[in-house]
Amino acid sequence: MANYCHLSYEDRKNIEDGLNDNKSIYTISKELNRSYSSIYREIDRNKVYYKPDNHKYINFSDPKDIYKYEHCTKLDKSPHVCNGCKSRSGCRKERFTYYARKADDSYHEIKSEARKGINLTPEEVFKINEIITPLVKKGQTTNHLYINHPDILNFSKPSFYNYINQGVFEFKPMDFPRIVKYKKRKNSNKRRTRKEREIRIGRTYEDFCKYILENPDLNIVEIDTVEGLQEESDCFLTILWRKSKFMLIFKLESQTTDEVTRIFEYLQQTLNEEDYKKLFPVILTDNGHEFFDVLNIECNHKTGELITKLFFCDPHASSQKGMIEKNHEFIRYVLPKPSSFRNINQNDCDILKNHINSLCRDSLNGKSPYEAMLFLCNEEILHSLNCYYIEPDEVQLNQKLLK
């Protein structure tokens, strides 16, 4: 027999059908593999009372006893409802009827009401306010908070959001960084030049998928640019490793092939050849003109040896490198649109990337991208690229970070 299991609508429909067939509560309980008391309480709790139109006049002197309705003696016997009565439709007596649909609606309403309210003590609310409020003000995400403070955030995330919306805590919904904004789609009718079309030969997204299928163990790197104000040329070059979600950010003075080449020259000079080959075997990017100097990205700048494979996404298909697009959200927590990058230097970029890379992620089993990147390379390599780990409670991702 099922223990402590709620009745479903199908169970309630079977109860109604059984009552309509004049089955006893005992028989119904056996058919449903439920206890007698559960079926009895279900019927008694949810039976619907019907008041007949006709009535008998009793006493004018007592307003509480003016009318009396004719009572049916059949209701004195189990199951105390009129479902199986053949004369129910034309009956002029008061009656009770069990309806599965109304019973199920009542059940869900009671269940919903029971789950409303706050299941926290004043002491728990005070402790959450004391510890979590400063971290929220730093721009830390909900996932990061849950991973690093499971002792006080020991309830579900939906409950956490409900408590915030109800004003239980000192921090408000607007204190969290994730405010979704969709940028206007670009309507570009520019045709690519013959040279640009030739560059894509053998480097399309279809070619990328085939290459990865043949070489499944390679590190896939996504690269992109993040633009500041339209009237300014300053932008960021972002480089992200898919396996670890670790991201580098470099300041570009202009969105040109020369600036992108400068960054890859710096990376090859900073890393030894073997480490560079291991970290940059495959690169996927969009069709931005700044990436069209493919040889300076694919080749060793000293020897001219081909050490990297570069591929381009399909036009207007940013979802093909969705991981880096998603990671750009964290940049926008600190530098929301429209923000100028003119006064941002490389040191600021290093601070920004270190805070982003120290943010814990559910998709990494509660680890940060920095910790995940240590499975791909050693910490000395990360330090050579000015990458350092920031303690969880010190992570800050809001506009105050670079001020």
Image (cartoon, grey):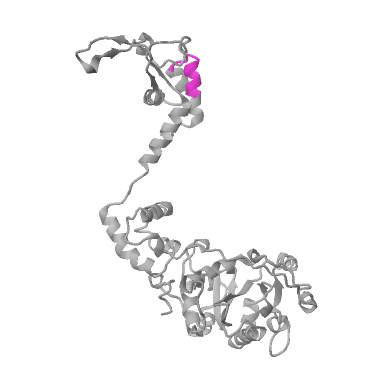
Query: Looking at the picture, how far across and down is residue 263, in whole percent?
Result: 61, 84
Quarter holding residue 176: bottom left
Please report the bounds of the magenta region as a residue range: 14-24
Classify the position of the N terminus by image quarter: top left
Q: Residue at x 63, y 63 (%)?
A: 319
Q: Specify whether 231 is left or right of 123.
A: right
Classify the position of the C terminus by image quarter: bottom left
Query: Looking at the picture, how far across and down is residue 71, in whole percent?
Result: 34, 11
Q: Specify whether 60 is left or right of 320.
A: left
Q: Residue at x 43, y 52 (%)?
A: 158
| Residue at far front of view | 60
Quarter holding residue 103: top left
Q: How many marks?
A: 0
8 or 243: nearer the viewer? 8
247 or 163: nearer the viewer? 163
Quarter holding residue 62: top left
Query: Looking at the picture, how far across and down is residue 248, in whole percent?
Result: 55, 77
Query: Looking at the picture, how far across and down is residue 384, in whole percent?
Result: 53, 84
Q: Specify whether 153 is left or right of 303.
A: left
Q: Is residue 273 magenta?
A: no
Eyeballing the image, is 238 above or below 16?
Answer: below
* Magenta residues, dominant SS class: helix
